[in-house]
Every structure is written in C-alpha cells, then in structure tokens.
Amino acid sequence: QQPVQSPQAVILREGEDAVINCSSSKALYSVHWYRQKHGEAPVFLMILLKGGEQKGHEKISASFNEKKQQSSLYLTASQLSYSGTYFCGTELYNAGNMLTFGGGTRLMVKP
Amino acid sequence: ETGVTQTPRHLVMGMTNKKSLKCEQHLGHNAMYWYKQSAKKPLELMFVYNFKEQTENNSVPSRFSPECPNSSHLFLHLHTLQPEDSALYLCASSQGTGGGELFFGEGSRLTVL
C-alpha cells in the first residue's frame, strides 16, 4: 500500500519554509526522499532509517517518526531551485530497495 | 547527468508494434530497475535485476518483457501494448538491492496509439 503524502501541492515565496509529510499504514524500515524537476530524472535527497533519525541536506532536512510511521521533509528559506515534485519512497522492514512511492507533492517557489 | 542513460527519450507506437527501451548505467552498480510513472499516479516498480538476475516482478503484464544481459544494460521489450500503457518509463540503478540511493535516468516517454 502506497504512503500518503500531504499536501499535494504548495506554493511558496522565496525564503519561506515548507513541510511535506509522508505517512504509512505499515511498519517501515526506512523512508527515502527524492525530488523531480519537470522533464528531469528524480534525484535522491536523503534516506532515513528507523530510529527517529533526522538528516539534513543543505537547507533541507527530514525526520522519521517510527512510532507514527511518518516522515516529514523540512525545506527552510526556500530557493527557486527547490521547485519540483517531491516523492517519498517507503521500505518495509528489510525489503531492500523495494520502495513504494507516494503520489508526490508539487512545490513551486516564486520570486 | 546522473550516469544512467535511457533511449529513446520519446516513443510513439501502435498497439500491434514491437519496440524496446534501453537503459545503460555507467556507475558500476549491480542492481537495475524499471519504474512506470503515469500521470497523477505514484511511481510504480515494475522489475528489479540484481547481478543480471531478476529478483522482482511486480505483477507486470507479459506484454512487458525485461532483459538484462549484464549489470550495465537493461532493456524493456514492448509488444501489443494498450493505450493505458502510455507513460514515462524510468530506469534506475543502485549499488545493490540492500537499500541505498537510486540513480534514475531521465526516462522514455511512451505513447501508445
């Protein structure tokens, strides 16, 4: 069963912050985050393993709440280059790279 | 440039045609994947190959036939497709299938008439 992402779309002004959530009804081993710009390949952002780890990638960070089976992606002081569609991919316990992706969150950053 | 190259980038075919999509990775990875990305649908995993052996077939119809002659090349053979098979087909690779970053190609946009 695919994870549920929210919101489905968000529009920001440059410098504003955003949070994208990814929820699963099943116990997760890890959560992956990817960003895809229009007409381009999805690009890896980060992986979060069970244990509530929080990782960062420049001004983009994420957390993983194992108890809630939920991950959140935090984009702070957004830049125009952050625009794109963000996907979370969830891995069930020790399923390797058998990821199930959410429907995506379309982010648009305006000047 | 992600190190994963897909050809052709665009393909239009009739329902009775036979065509193939090609994927090549220059990253020295051992695992390769085919994903389907349809409009307004999540990325769907189709096939997984690890060291040239198919390890996953996600209930994909037989009109899609994958081939992995070596760890660097992956093909998706298409025959008697349906209009609903129109989508972006993405190839990805990773070091192994034990979890880790996926490197995606830019995809092959397929239109079935």
Image (cartoon, coloured by chain):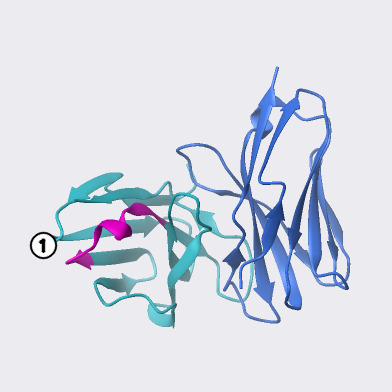
Chain colours: A blue, B cyan
* Residue A107 horizontal side relative to residue B95, left or right: right
- Hey, which residue is sitting farthest top in the picture? A111
Residue B104 in the image: state x and y as whole percent.
Answer: 49, 53
Position of residue B46 measured from the top left corner of the image (x, y, whole percent): 42, 70
Residue B32 appearing in the image: no
Is B87 colored magenta in this rendering? yes
Furthest residue in direction left, as rendered:
B16
- The image shows residue A76 at horizontal and vertical percentages of 83, 35
- Is residue A75 visible in the rendered image? The answer is yes
Residue placed most toward the observer, A86 or A46? A86
Question: What chain is tagged by disc 1?
Answer: B
Number of numbered labels in the structure image: 1
Q: Position of residue B16 (x, y in %)?
A: 11, 62
Circle 1: residue type = Thr
Quarter of the image with the N terminus of chain A in it = bottom right
Q: Quadrant of residue B36?
A: bottom left
Q: Quadrant of residue A55?
A: bottom right
User: Is A43 a magenta residue?
Assistant: no
Left or right, A63 with reference to A33: right
* Quadrant into which the C terminus of chain A falls: top right
Looking at the picture, tell me which residue is in the foreground, B67 or A2.
Answer: A2
Observer-nearest residue: A24 or B99? A24
**Residue identifier under label 1:** B16
**Residues shaded magenta:** B78-90
Residue positioned 74% across, 58% down in the render = A22
Residue at 66 percent across and 72 percent down: it is A91
Relative side of A107 to B55, left or right: right
| Residue depicted at x 61% and y 50% | A104
Callout 1: SS? loop
Label 1 packing within 10 angstroms: few (<14), some (14-19), many (20+): few
Question: Hey, which quadrant is residue B20 in on the image?
Answer: bottom left
Q: Is residue B30 above or below residue B16?
A: below
